[in-house]
Each structure stands twice: as C-alpha cells, then as structure tokens.
Amino acid sequence: MKQHSHPRGRFSSRLGYVLSVAGSAVGLGNIWRFPYLAAKHGGGMFLLVYLLLTVTLGYVLIVSETALGRMTGKSPVGAFRAFGQSGALRFGGWVNAVVPMLIVPYYSAIGGWVLKYLVEYLRGDVGRLAGDSYFTGFISSSAGAEGWFLLFSAAVLLVILAGVRQGVERVSKVMMPALILLAVFVTGYSVTRPGALAGVRYFLIPNFANFSWMTVVAAMGQMFYSLSIAMGVLYTYGSYIGKDMDIEKSTGQVELFDTGVAMLGGMMIIPAVFAYSGGDLEALKAGPSLTFVTLPKIFADMGMGQAVGIAFFLMFFFAALTSAISLMETSVSTLQDELGWSRRVCCVVMAGVQLIFGSLACLGYGVLDFVQIFGMALLDFFDFLTNSVMMPVAALATCFLILRRVGVERVAAEVELSSEFRRKGMYRFFLRYLAPACIAVILISSVANVLGWISL
Ligand code: TRP
C-alpha cells in the first residue's frame, strides 16, 4: 500500500481554524436545507430536537473526529487504518470518505439553482421570479437545470484544478459576515410582514402535537449535514491542528456559529411562508423548493428587491461554492492519498462522478421524473441515502473505532492536552452508552420507514 506523506499544513491561530471549519459548515445546509426541514417536520419541535442533538450527539462526534484526526495526523481512511487492518476498520474509514463524493454532485445541482437565481436577479425580472410556478417550471425544464448545474460544477472543478482555494477562502471571509448581515436584514423584513408572527411562533415554540419520530430522523440527518459530521472532513481538519489548539472551545464556537446561521435561515423563510401563503399551510411542506419559492416573494415585496436579491444570491452562491469546493477537495485528496493516482487523474474521476450523479439529480425533476426510488425523486433520494443512511453508518463506525480500538480514555486524554474538557463526563457517558444506541435506532427506523415497514 502506498503511503503518501504530503507535508501537513497547520492552522496558525484558533480564529483561523474556527473560521475555516465554520466556513465549511455554513452553506446550503443552513439557508436551503434547514428551513425546509424545520417547516416540514414540526417547526419549534424540530428546532428543539435539533438543538438538543447538536449539544449532545453532535458535540461528542465533532470532538471525537477532530481528536482522532489530530492524534493520527491522518484523514479518515488513514486514521482508521492507524488502529488496525481489519475489514471492519477499512469499511469504517471508507464509508466516511465516500460520503462527500456522493454529496458534492447533488450539492452542485442545487448550487446551479442558486447561480440561476443570481443571474435572473441581475437581469431584473423580480416579479416573474416570485411567481408561484416559476421554480417548478425551472427545475422541470431539464436542459435549463442541467446547464446551470454544469456551469456551477465547472466553477468548482476549475478552482480545484487551478489550486486557488486559498483565494476563495479569503473572499469567503468577507462574504460570510456580509451574508449574515444581509440575512439579519431580510429576517427583519420577513418577520414584520402581516401574518408573519404566526410563523415566528411556529418556528420558535415547540408544540408537542407536531412531534413525530420523523422529526428526530430528519433533525439528526440535518445535524450531520450542517456540521459536516460523519464525512471525514473533521478528521482532516483535525490533522491540520497543533497539540495546543483548544478542541473543546473551538467545537463550541463552530456549533454556535453554524446554528446561529441556520436559525437566521429559518427566521427568514418560515414566517414569510405564513405571510405569503394566505393561510394555506400546505406551503410548509414544499420541501427542497421552499427557499427558492419563498425568498423571491420577499424580495419582490421590498422596495429594493432587485438589489437585495442580487446581493443575497451572490453571497448564497459563494457560501455554496466554497462548501462545494471543500467537499470536492476532500474527495480528490482522499483518492490521491489512498489510490496513489495523480491529482489530475483524481480530478477527472471526480468530474465523472459529478457529471453522472449530478445530472441524475438535476434531471430527476425533469425528463427522469418517472424514476422514483421509494417514492422519492432522484435528488431527494441521494440526499436521503447520504444523510439518513450513510452518515449514521459513518458515525457508528467512529463510535466503534473509539469504543473497540482506541478507548474513550485515550481520546479524552488527547482532548485534555489542550482543553479543560469540562464536558468530559457527558462525553464519556454519551459515547459509551447513548451515542451508538441512538444512532442505530434512528438509522433503523428511517430505513424501515422508507421501505414501508413502519410509518413514521
Ligand atoms: N455543512 C455544509 C452545509 O451546511 C455542507 C457540507 C457537508 C460540507 N459536508 C461538508 C461543506 C464538507 C464543506 C465540507 O451546507
């Protein structure tokens, strides 16, 4: 087996590290995926479950992955291999590494939607974009949707090939705060629309009548997705930090940042759905289209709708682009490290994967709409497969690696090198007794639900 020893980079400061991890965490997940899931799966109830999962399971997993990355100095496949050669360990490493390869294609399909909206706002027909069937018309147009996906993918691949990731990161350090300011502004506008207050209540106040097991399944998948857990990324980041980096503190900051942006996303979109749906709350169930249908309505209503639309989609585009680039970069470097191929060949392979799976995702709403897997369109199916099946499996693999091979105490000791580790008691207890069981129960029930064995 080839072992490539790239010189490993180092983050020089905690701020730089936290911003980089937060930058990879904040993306489509916060502004597109979180609001539509929260709207669909119980509003305040979803939010409550999501927050509880973030500070428990999410916290434990982020700390674990980062500590394992730092301990071994390797990305996931190598980190698992550092503790043995068994088939189970190889599988564990690979399942973590494959997830980003399957996410980046459909992520880019949605990136294409964002790009399309950006260009349409530049053209200026704000009213048309706010029309009820505009979005559905667009994604079912096949050629159109595919074209924008290809454009977005080309941007991602060009950046990867040219290796100008550093530059992109610098741009996104400006774009990210700007995105947040603009989101605060749009939120302010959205929550003051007549009728929006009911939406604020729906989103912020848990109502147990809205609870279903699906709320938990969806919230857990979203937490993995949004915090970039269970896909090898945090192992890789962990391998780039020094022994003096406070893992406990930085994890808390990343969680706070990511959750804050997700809540802004929810506050922007859900109250507006109440305000613009004229009382028809079926609109809450719109799914993946929610953000793209609701935001244009808000913008069309505003005095400076076009300017706000351009600014917003520009930043949204950058958030999506930087996340897609890190997903692609992770995928390419895993292939490079593990298969020993050149960077160029790995890029070509990933471009192929991207083209095939991304096109399927795009066309699944158009010419391929007869293809339904377990009742889901292709994009929804890829999303379900990665978030609700593969990520829980990957997270379980990390738990077992720690419980069976590394030992909870050793990981805790790694964290304690640089942190007080005040939540150590919770960490140990959760990892030993709750995390594997919770993940397994949620995984089994989500699969059984889709197969029609149970109905959640
Ligand atoms: N967390 C990102 C989001 O919310 C998506 C994502 C998942 C990601 N895994 C990643 C981004 C890895 C960069 C790297 O949109």
Image (cartoon, rainbow, N blue to C red):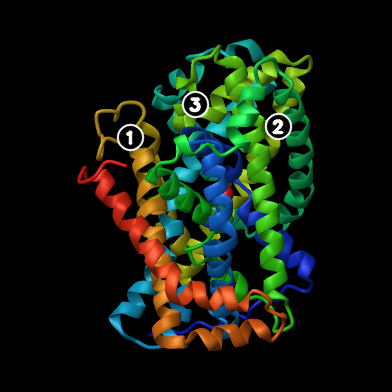
**What label does residue 284 carry, if any?**
3
Asked where in the image residue 454 lies, by quadrant, the reply is: top left
Tag 3 near tag 1, CB within 8 Å: no
Sequence-earlier tag: 2 or 1: 2
Residue picked out by circle 1: 377
What separation in Å lies between label 3 and label 1 (alpha carbons)? 19 Å
Q: How many marks?
A: 3
Q: Is residue 455 above or below residue 70?
A: above
Residue picked out by circle 2: 312
Q: What residue type is labelled 3?
A: Leu
Q: Which amino acid does label 1 sit on?
A: Ala
At x 62% / y 23%, what residue is drawn? 198
Residue 142 visible? The answer is: yes
Sequence-earlier tag: 3 or 1: 3
Residue 151 visible? The answer is: no
Q: Which amino acid does label 2 sit on?
A: Phe
Which percent across, then down, holds residue 150?
Answer: 48, 38
Specify whether 455 is left or right of 48: left
Q: In this view, does 145 lie above or below 162?
A: above
Which percent across, then down, holds residue 136?
Answer: 44, 21
Mark 1 lies on a secondary structure that is loop
At x 48% / y 80%, what residue is drawn? 79
